[in-house]
Image (tube, rainbow, N blue to C red):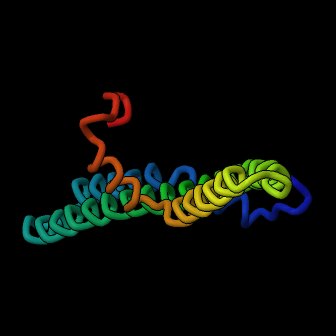
């Protein structure tokens, strides 16, 4: 544990890591308690109906947790990718600009093309999301290798 990490942070990280397992264990334990409880059949039926609802809620919560985790991962990857691409584009644009200053009209046109391409890449990176990924997969599904499907 780092000096700046509190027990609360460690506990929250542990709960996030084992979220699905904890919810599933809780649902199973409640179901076991109901089966072994000394209840009349009507009460057991109502409680088992509640268990079915609880398991549905657990499945929804697990799915939601996974979706939020994927969104966070995509956000982090987008920021990292933006930074790396922007660094490379800055280098490329700097080199193109230095050649374009002293160059002819053809080299200046190349510089404008490079600037337009850099802006296009930056815009694509800003719009990167799960939805854009799904649209891209749908558009190019026939061309994608089997491993990416």
Residue at left offset 29%, top offset 52%: 32
Which residue is the extreme one toward the front? 104
Which residue is the extreme one toward the right? 3
Which residue is at the front of the view, 30 or 99? 99
**Can residue 82 be seen from the camera position used here?**
no
Q: Quadrant of residue 14?
A: bottom right
Residue at left offset 82%, top offset 54%: 94
**Can residue 50 be seen from the camera position used here?**
yes
At which x and y percent is residue 58?
A: 34, 61
Please state if 82 lies on the left or on the right of 40 as rendered. right
Which residue is at the front of the view, 80 or 6? 80
At which x and y percent is residue 45?
A: 11, 66
Residue at left offset 27%, top offset 56%: 31
Residue at left offset 17%, top offset 63%: 48
Q: Quadrant of residue 108?
A: bottom right
Please state if 83 lies on the left or on the right of 118 as rendered. right
Which residue is at the front of the view, 33 or 89? 89
Q: Quadrant of residue 132?
A: bottom left
Q: Which quadrant holds the C terminus?
A: top left
Please state if 40 lies on the left or on the right of 74 as rendered. left
107 up-or-down from 132: above or below: above
At which x and y percent is residue 12?
A: 64, 62
At which x and y percent is residue 40?
A: 11, 67
Which residue is at the front of the view, 131 or 45? 131
Which residue is the extreme one toward the top? 146
Total residue callouts: 0
């Amino acid at each position: 544990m780092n000096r700046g990490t509190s027990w609360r942070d460690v506990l929250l990280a542990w709960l996030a890591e084992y979220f699905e397992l904890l919810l599933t264990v809780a649902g199973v334990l409640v179901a076991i308690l109901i089966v072994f409880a000394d209840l009349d059949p009507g009460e057991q039926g109502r409680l088992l109906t509640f268990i079915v609802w609880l398991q549905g809620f657990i499945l929804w919560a697990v799915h939601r947790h996974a979706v939020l985790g994927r969104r966070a991962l995509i956000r982090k990857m987008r920021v990292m990718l933006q930074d790396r691409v922007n660094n490379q584009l800055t280098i490329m644009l700097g080199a193109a600009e230095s050649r374009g200053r002293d160059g002819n009209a053809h080299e200046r046109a190349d510089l404008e093309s490079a600037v337009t391409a850099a802006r296009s890449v930056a815009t694509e990176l800003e719009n990167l999301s799960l939805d854009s990924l799904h649209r891209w997969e749908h558009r190019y599904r026939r061309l994608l290798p089997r491993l990416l499907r």
